[in-house]
Image (cartoon, rainbow, N blue to C red):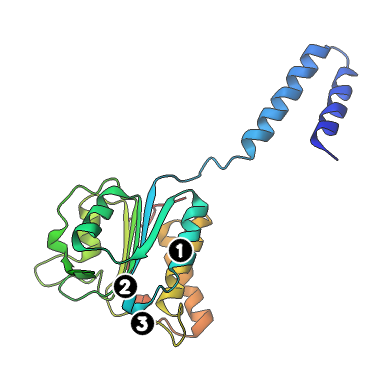
Amino acid sequence: MKMTRKLHLAFKSLTGLKNISRGQAMMICLLLVSALFFNSINVNAASGNAKVYYLSSLGSGQTAGIRNNLESMGYSVTRTTMPTKAGLKSAYQNNKIVYLTSHGSTSGTTTCSDGSLSYNDITANLSNLKFAFVDTCYSAYTPSGGMSMTYKIYNRGASSTLGFTGTVTMSSYPGGGCDYFALGVFQYAYSGYTIGQSVSYSKADMMTQYGQYYGVDTAKTYGTSITIY
């Protein structure tokens, strides 16, 4: 039945009641229409810019799916190969979400297109950044006398960060292993779960899918209670 027909029947029913004038019945119907309209809008829709990066030598992994999830949340997403060091620093400053899959090291670096970005290079205020997922080996590993990359980003103001204290690997087919985990994190986040919950559920899915973790059991999160949708 069309909505106009339903409203017409509702109007007739209301006007048939005692002590309700036609004007009052019309007002009630209009309020019902407004409630239905606003209920159809996702008041939790996200907004802002997001960047999704991948290192060419590693392949694009699940970055297309991650982009799609972020776009469904409401973010304006750019997906491309790894930027320069300056480009990645700028991305952390000027986006709500940054995801990257690349190489990392125990000295707290991330491989960019023109070399390695060190945690020491992260000096700007990053309070605009809601979530950074540095999907590299050792991105959450703390070097002697220093900081991990993910902690430094969090320390500079990001609401939440995710990385790994150990090595992570892909499975034998593209998009598997740690890439499968990464996609799962964003799928759960899209469903409204916190970052901490999304990580836990996606780790559990890894065991169901593969019977092993491919290193994602070393995942470490700062700002676990944050939601991005």
Name the residue tied to disc 2: 55
Q: Quadrant of residue 2?
A: top right
Q: Residue furthest left?
A: 145
Q: Residues within 10 Å of mark 2 (few under 14, many from 20)?
A: some
Q: Residue at x 78, y 18 (%)?
A: 26
Give the number of the disc on residue 169.
3
- Looking at the rendered image, the disc whose residue lies closer to the viewer, 1 or 3, is 1
Residue that label 1 marks: 66
Which corner quadrant of the image does residue 169 belong to?
bottom left
Q: Residue furthest bottom?
A: 172
Mark 1 surroundings within 10 Å by alpha-carbon count, few (fewer than 14), some (14 through 19), many (20 or more)? many
Badge 3 amino acid: Thr
First in sequence, mark 1 or 3: give its number.
Answer: 1
Label pair 1/3, CB-CB below 8 angstroms: no
Q: Is residue 102 visible?
A: yes
Report the Cα–Cα distance between label 3 and label 2: 14 Å
- Label 2 residue SS: loop
Residue type marked 1: Ile
